[in-house]
Structures are given as structure tokens and as C-alpha cells.
Image: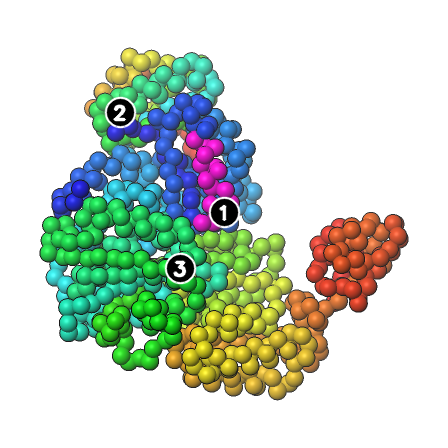
Amino acid sequence: MRLKPEDLDKISERMKATTLLREGAGNAKIIVHMGTCGIASGARKILSSFLRLVEEKDAKDIILTTSGCAGLCSKEPMATVELKGQPPVKYVDLTEEKVVRIFKEHILGGKIVTEYAFALGSERIS
Amino acid sequence: MPRFRMNLMVCTGTGCVSNGAFRIKEALEREIQKHALQDEIQIVTTGCNGFCANGPIVVVQPDGIFYQMLTEKDIPFLVEEHFLKGRPVQKLMYVPPETKSPVPHMRDIGFFKKQRLIALANRGIVDPEKIDEYIARDGYRGLLKALTSMTPVEIVEAIKKSGLRGRGGAGFPTGLKWEICRAQPGDEKYVICNADEGDPGAFMDRSIVESDPHSVLEGMLIGARAIGASHGFIYIRNEYPLALKRIKIAIQQAEEYGLIGDNILGTDFNFHVGVNRGAGAFVCGEETSLINSLEGKLPHPRVRPPYPAQSGYMGKPTNINNVETWANVPRILQYGAEWFAGIGTEKSKGTKVFSLVGKVNNTGLVEVPMGITLREIIFDIGGGIQNGKKFKAVQTGGPSGGCIPESMLDIPVDFESLTKAGSIMGSGGMIVMDEDTCMVEVARYFLAFTQDESCGKCTFCRIGTKRMLEILERITKGEGKEEDIEKLEQLSVNVKMGSLCALGQTAPNPVITTLKHFRNEYLAHIRDNKCPAKQCKCLITYRIVPDNCVGCGACLRNCPVGAIAGEKKQLHVIDQEKCIKCGICLDSCRFSAVMVS
């Protein structure tokens, strides 16, 4: 395929999700806690639900990643949602239904789902 | 298009490949399949990450976690712990010697902190074999600008204004070179990319081609547009198989997209490029020799003037630039000449890539802004000298550079300052030496290289370097005479003056600078028959200290020539007649009983 000038930007747009992922520079970041406790209480399913939603919406500037146990094993599965310029929000006792709502209202809509939120903020890593 | 939540950037530069990077990649693939994560985690092969000393390297994105010195057996644990359960694995991270605590993020590692990437901006971020990834990182936008919103004269002006100077060694202003070539009459002109990097221990250009070949192609396209050329050559060493493979893939992909060929991006601009492999002669890195070689002639330098810009390949105006110079061009057009001119020093703009090697802790490929000090490069980025030894000298600019002593470590790294210190920027080799390095031997080693690589055209370079080498060999054998020093100095001047090209003109640099800064070492060899660094085999002897020897037999077993005798638990003795001074006894003794004198 021979490129026309405007095709360069089309390729960039198509690749945007990959570029942002590698630069670690999305508008929103979802961290699913995947410690043993998280996995045991179904974090894997939570991760897959988020991944499916991101794919469905083709939302390119959302980064989905994992981390270990957040230290609050009794409230797993947990996820932390960080919107650019806002403090991270921790959601606890997640289910697939809750994930759908959090994704729609908080990640896409920018409004924290307070009923599921546990706390604002996140621990510091040295 | 599937969405991945994680990208594993596996360094597949030549350094990591030789340490088993492809085996690491296969192991990752296997384990990821095993945990059924293949739809969530993408493995990407990238060019050289730069931290070659600690390869094989994998950087995990989006979090930027840096894993180093990986082995196949680490992979199952790594995949399960981090990629499945999200717990980064500390024992595979970088641990700085001073703090002893692992550093998870690549950006926090001292080696990377002080670097500024322009030529290597895409290293470790794109897969060099996928053109879309280059385009996604604003690739070919400089070309687009050059073709659609700038005239060729404006392109030349932009490069002139940026202050970009040739990165291959001499530091000639790139914009001026283009302007001269552009001003020549005739429509048949050529651009050449010099990728014949021959300096021992230098791998800047190889790494650029391996990690981001499209940046070089885009630079050449812009240069060709500016000077009015429609054909180009990439002259690359045959010893660089991976770089060769990647540049060929890049050309093919660019051709498929119509970025190389006729009517590029729908404009009237045509450009075709060919790849030529160099057969390994050092002198071919010199531009006129390279052009002769390209024409199928013996690689001898030509008399200048006329310069290649006036009469180059097949007698036509030819613009030849080095890999790193070309790689800088697209970014200058894209971000503007002022942006580039804002980085660096008054006369040396932008950044420079160095291959930092020798006795430093963190060997590898670094890109730093011009004007940074040698001390910052060696101690902050390089992490200081190995095994807590003392720094002695750094040689910049490859075999024809000079050795810079500790007293001059705070000079800024730019073209003028390095020349003033008796060395050169060269193409960017940087070899660090510690207290155990004999400076006479260093001078001999480098001169042996340039002497061997002299093409033989100029008498002084051919015979003068030979005589100098003979004198240096004599001195390292303890057979030097007082008048040798004066002879070396005289010959150095003559070889410099009597040679046509930079090979001869710079070959005496290691001798001149070591004579200037380390004259005492020469005198110790000549007057006292001593090698202060205890390296010159003819001037040292290995002995066993009776008080320390416990008669364990370790040296006896390891000696390759059977020069050590002694009963178990009795004092051992080295037979000086048989000893070949290999030093194995010294390395194998655990009781400090072997001494060099």
C-alpha cells in the first residue's frame, strides 16, 4: 500500500494504544491487585472483565495493569483506578457487575462510584 | 486489534543476543502460553537498550520495570510472580553497588538518569522490524514536513540553524556540507550513509541501525530532498549481520509504503537506496576511501579538494554523513532547529552517543547532551571503576583518539574541548582505563591497530607508524633507549603532517597524549626496566612469598606450563625459566602468596 500524507496519522491513531502503553502515559490507569489473595477471590475474572471492556470501547488511552496484594486481603478482589491529575481510588469486593459500572461511570465518565470505593489515595513506593 | 495490558520489551541488540536474548524470548513465550496470558501480554523485540553490561534485559511496560542478567531458569518464576500475580521480582532488578537495594524502575537507575535521547529516542520502545511502530512514534513526519511545507533551501537552512555537526568524527557542520553539495551544478547527485564503523570497542552506529533503522532512512530521504539527489547508498560493515538484516527489512517496508521509490507521499520526489557491504577495512570509514570502495576500486583516500560534495561517487556531487548524523535529522525537522540548538554547548549542539567500555562498572551505549563532563559520564552514568580500583585515563575517539588523565576529567565533552585536550570526539568510542593499565602498552596496542589498517598510500602513514610501533615494542620489552622518546615525538609530528587522510593524521594521538600525560611510565620502562602498572611481561616476575604460602597446590595445578614445583603443605617455587607470566597463579592463590614485581 502506497501511503498518502494523511495515512501517517491514521497509522499513529491505529497504534495509539500500543504507544501509550509503552510510554506508560494513558489518561486512566486501572490496576488490578493480583496477589494470591486476589487471585483466590477471583481477581483473574475482574482483570478479564476490564480487558474486555477496554477492547469493546476501543479506549486507547486506558492502561490496564496488575500489581500484587494491596494488604487488605479480606476485601479482595480489589482494583485501583487512577485518572490523570486525580488521586487514585481503591475499589474493594469487586464483582463483574461492579466492574461494568466503575468502568462506565468512573473511568469513562470521570465520576467516582462512591458506594464501591474504599479509600482515596495509594501507598507510596520508595 | 487485540488489546494487551502489558508489553515485554526484550532487548535484542547484538550484546544481549550474544548473552542469549532469543532464548529468553522463547522461554517467555513458553511460560506465557502455559499461563494462557498470550492475549494479554505482548512480547516485543527491540534494539539495543544501552545497558549492555547487564544483559539480557527485559523492560516491562507500562510500569517501566527493568529486569537484567536474565537466565532461562529465571523465567518461569518471573512470569508467574510478576506477569500473572503482579508482584515485581526484586532479585532480577538492578542493584546499585553503593546502596545495595534493588531499583525497580528503569528511569531511576543512575545509568539512564543523565542520558538524553535524540538519535536513540526510539531505542527499547519500538520493534525495529515494524515500520508502523516507527510511524506511531511520529516517524516520517520530518520527511512529510520536508516534502509538503518546506523548500529544499529551507531544509538546508534549518539544518544549518540547528548547529548539527557530523557525528562520524571530524565534526564538520552538516548544513554547510549540504549547502555546498546543493550548490553544485548537475541533476545527478548522491547521498551516502557511512555505517562502516571500524573503531575497536565502538558500537554506536550499529546500535542505532539495529534499534531504529527507519530514523536513518528518514534522515537520508530528507538530505536527498535538500541537496537534490534521487539515489543513495548505505555502506555498512559485513561484520554487522543484525544491523544489515534490519536495515534491509526497513528499506523493504518503506518501499511497500511508497516512502522509498517514485512519487514519495504523492509528491514529485523520487529516491532509491542501495545497501553495500564493507569488507572490513578500517580505512573505508574515511569518506573518500569509502567512495572509492563503492566504485569498486581499492579503498585509498583521495586528495581533497575536490571534496565529495563537489566530486564524489562516480565524479558526481555526493553528500556523505555518518549514521548518527542522519538519525538526528528527522527530529530537527520535526521539533525545529531552535529546539536542537537549545541543547548542548555554544559550538557543539545536540547530543552525542558514546560506547562506554573498558574498566567501568556500567559498560554500554549512552547518549548524553554535549557539554556534560567526562567525570559525569564515567562516574555517574558508568558507575565508576570496576573492583574499586583507581581511574587512570580515558581514551575518546577510538584508536586514533588521545588518552585523557584524571586532572582533565572535568572538561566539557564537545568537539573543541576534546581536541584541545589532545584527543578527538571521533565517532564516540570511550575506553576507560584503571590503575592496572600500562599506558605504554596502550599506545602500542592502538598504534599496532592503526599501523595494521594503514592502506599504504602515504609513506609516513605506512612506514612512519611502523617505525613508531617498533620503538614502542622495544620499550615494552625493556629495551628502550633515552633518545626513543624524542624520536617518537618527531615521528608523530611527521606522520600527522605527511598523511592524506584522518587515519594517518590521527594515528599518533595515543602516543602523543600518553607521552604528555604519562611520561613517567615511559621513563620507568626505559631507565629502570620497570613497568609501573605491572603489565609488560618482559619487565615483571612472579614470585611466591614464603611466609604466606600454605602449600595448597592451587597454583601448581593451574599453571599451564608446569613452572611451579612444591610438595603438599610445603613452600612452592616458580621456575622463572619456564614461567610465561600469564598470571594464572596470582588469580588462583587464595592466600595472597603470589607477588608480581
Q: Residue at x 25, y 29 (%)?
A: B1
- Which of the two labelled residues, at mark 3 and mark 1, occupies the earlier sequence position? 1
Q: Name the mark nearer the viewer: 3 or 1.
A: 3
Q: Residue at x 22, y 68 (%)?
A: B178
Discs 1 and 2 carry the same chain letter: no
Pointer 3 with pointer 1, Cβ within 8 A: no
Q: How many marks?
A: 3
Badge 3 amino acid = Arg
Badge 2 amino acid = Val
Side (left or right) of A17 relative to B458 = left
Q: Secondary structure at mark 1?
A: helix
Residue at image mark 3? B237
Q: Which residues are magenta?
A: B14-29
Badge 1 amino acid = Ser
Q: Residue at x 38, y 80 (%)?
A: B500
Answer with the quarter of the image where residue A17 lies: top left
- Separation (CA) of disc 1 from disc 2: 38 Å
Task: Work out whether residue B325 can be spotted.
Answer: no
Residue at image mark 1? B18
Q: Which quadrant, please, contains the C terminus of chain B?
A: bottom right
Residue B330: say if magenta.
Answer: no
Side (left or right) of B193 relative to B79 = left
Residue B27: say if magenta.
Answer: yes
- Separation (CA) of disc 2 from disc 3: 46 Å
Mark 1, Cα crowd under 10 Å, few <14 / some 14-19 / many 20+, is few
- Residue at the extreme front of the image, as rendered: B296
- Separation (CA) of disc 3 from disc 1: 18 Å
Q: Which chain letter goes with mark 3? A: B
Q: Which labelled disc corresponds to residue A54?
A: 2
Mark 2, Cα crowd under 10 Å, few <14 / some 14-19 / many 20+, is many
Residue B478 horizontal/vertical position (percent): 68, 76
